[in-house]
Image (spheres, helix red, strand yellow):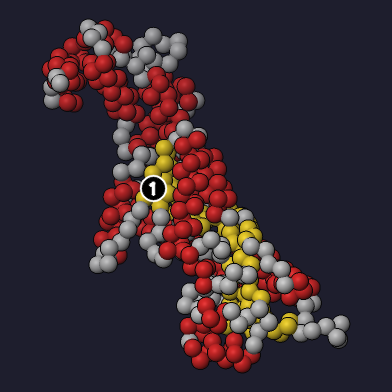
């Protein structure tokens, strides 16, 4: 052991974010458990940006290897002086192209993050989804694009709708303007809706926008962030559910690959770590069961509003809907209004009128028959309701819809 070479390894401590701290912890745990004879020197992000500090580290100390948490503002020429490099990220990302081609990259699987988030929200009984992108640097936008593509595709393959929110900030946009813009986007989403935000910071902006728009969390909007930064997740109201990637595992693998590099000189192009755990908090806890109940109610309303639930020959009623869902009429009404901000009877009536409009546009059925099909046994009642809702008669609506 005494004849074993003592390598000099520089470790980037980045900007002290949780992800970086966890990666450094994983790196050091591997070194300690293996009792590796490494002389380790830590440096911060600002050291890499300061020419004198960087020269002292690279030119005077002359490390045998370096573990990078970020490649921003690091000179490509200086990196080429270091024989062994392990970096966090993906070698296919533009920001990483400053690294020499022999660098081993260790990254987080963005696809698994999106998949775990989607599965969690689906378990809450949701069938409307949205993804919120960041507004910051290009590397984050790349990771965000991968997450959004997987999240949207999984929703569509399951037969659900999914919206992407790109709250691009102009150079002069301030916090208040961005908040109002995002609040407007969120207010337009169908509810209840499950949202995956790019990270916890973006999720905090979503929560602020929901609070501004008076959207109820988690009854109307459920939110998942990424990174599990507890200073954000635990200190916002409501507390944020977050996906915690395996940053510790990334650090462990980085140290393992550095050991292999020092021994063999052979790089492995790109290695992936997945999700460590889901830290579930208030933003996805269906504390009252309202979201799941309302989602089930809406499915029945869409299918049976006009013809009624079997064996009833009449249109759907609030009582028959409550019976089908095995809840009391009053509980259904309270939870439905909490989530949808409208009454159950109003939702049933709206669905009936949607079908009336469709039949008027697409068929030549007599109005009396349309009324009967849509759960209105008295045609005059339908005509009065239609005029009150749309400001026109059934016949005039049919005529105008057939006019080329």
Query: Residue 348: where, in percent of width, then height?
Result: 33, 24
Quarter of the rendering containing residue 250? bottom right
User: In the image, is 53 to the left or to the right of 4?
Assistant: left
Image height of 291 relative to 177, above or below: above
Q: Nearer the viewer, residue 7 or 136?
A: 7
Residue at the location (85% across, 86% down)? 3
Residue 221 shows in the view: no
Query: Residue 157: where, in percent of width, then height?
Result: 50, 35
Quadrant containing the N terminus is: bottom right
Residue 181 shows in the view: yes
Quadrant containing the C terminus is: top left
Query: Residue 6: where, in percent of width, then height?
Result: 76, 85
Image height of 271 relative to 10, above or below: above
Image height of 380 relative to 230, above or below: above
Q: Nearer the viewer, residue 279 or 119?
A: 119
Residue at the spot of label 1: 164
Image height of 198 relative to 323, above or below: below
Residue at the location (46% across, 49% down)? 148
Residue at the location (51% across, 75% down)? 15
User: In the image, is 178 to the left or to the right of 105?
Assistant: left
Mark 1: give few (<14), some (14-19) or many (20+) Cα within 10 Å.
some
Residue at the location (51% across, 91% down)? 52
The total number of labels drawn is 1
Badge 1 element:
strand
Query: Residue 179: where, in percent of width, then height?
Result: 30, 58
User: In the image, is 15 to the left or to the right of 38?
Assistant: left
């Amino acid at each position: 052991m005494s004849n074993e070479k003592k390598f000099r390894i520089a470790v980037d401590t980045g900007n002290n974010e949780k992800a970086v701290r966890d990666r450094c912890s994983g790196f050091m745990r591997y070194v300690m458990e293996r009792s590796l004879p490494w002389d380790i020197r830590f440096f911060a992000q600002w050291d890499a940006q300061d020419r004198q500090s960087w020269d002292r580290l690279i030119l005077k100390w002359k490390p045998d290897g370096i573990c990078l948490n970020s490649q921003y503002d690091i000179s490509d020429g200086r990196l080429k002086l270091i024989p062994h490099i392990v970096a966090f990220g993906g070698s296919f990302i533009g920001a990483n192209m400053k690294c020499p081609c022999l660098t081993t990259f260790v990254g987080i699987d963005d696809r698994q993050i999106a998949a775990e988030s989607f599965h969690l929200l689906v378990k809450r009984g949701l069938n409307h989804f949205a993804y919120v992108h960041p507004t910051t640097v290009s590397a984050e936008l790349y990771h965000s694009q991968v997450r959004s593509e997987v999240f949207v595709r999984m929703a569509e393959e399951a037969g659900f709708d999914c919206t992407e929110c790109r709250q691009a900030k102009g150079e002069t946009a301030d916090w208040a303007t961005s908040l109002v813009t995002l609040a407007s986007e969120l207010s337009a989403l169908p509810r209840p809706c499950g949202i995956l935000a790019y990270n916890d910071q973006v999720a905090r902006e979503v929560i602020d926008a929901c609070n501004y728009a008076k959207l109820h969390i988690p009854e109307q909007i459920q939110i998942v962030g990424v990174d599990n930064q507890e200073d954000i997740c635990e200190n916002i109201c409501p507390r944020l559910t977050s996906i915690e990637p395996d940053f510790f595992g990334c650090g462990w693998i980085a140290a393992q690959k550095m050991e292999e590099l020092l021994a063999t000189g052979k790089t492995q192009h790109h290695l992936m770590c997945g999700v460590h755990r889901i830290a579930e908090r208030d933003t996805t806890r269906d504390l009252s069961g309202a979201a799941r109940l309302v989602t089930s109610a809406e499915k029945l309303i869409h299918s049976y509003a006009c013809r009624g639930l079997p064996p009833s020959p009449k249109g759907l009623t609030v009582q028959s809907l409550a019976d089908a869902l095995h809840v009391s009429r009053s509980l259904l009404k309270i939870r439905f209004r909490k989530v949808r901000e409208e009454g159950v009877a109003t939702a049933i009536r709206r669905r009936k009128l949607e079908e009336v409009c469709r039949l008027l546009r697409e068929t030549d059925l007599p109005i009396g028959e349309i009324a009967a099909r849509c759960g209105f046994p008295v045609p005059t009642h339908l005509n009065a309701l239609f005029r009150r809702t749309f400001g026109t008669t059934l016949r005039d609506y049919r005529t105008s819809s057939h006019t080329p």
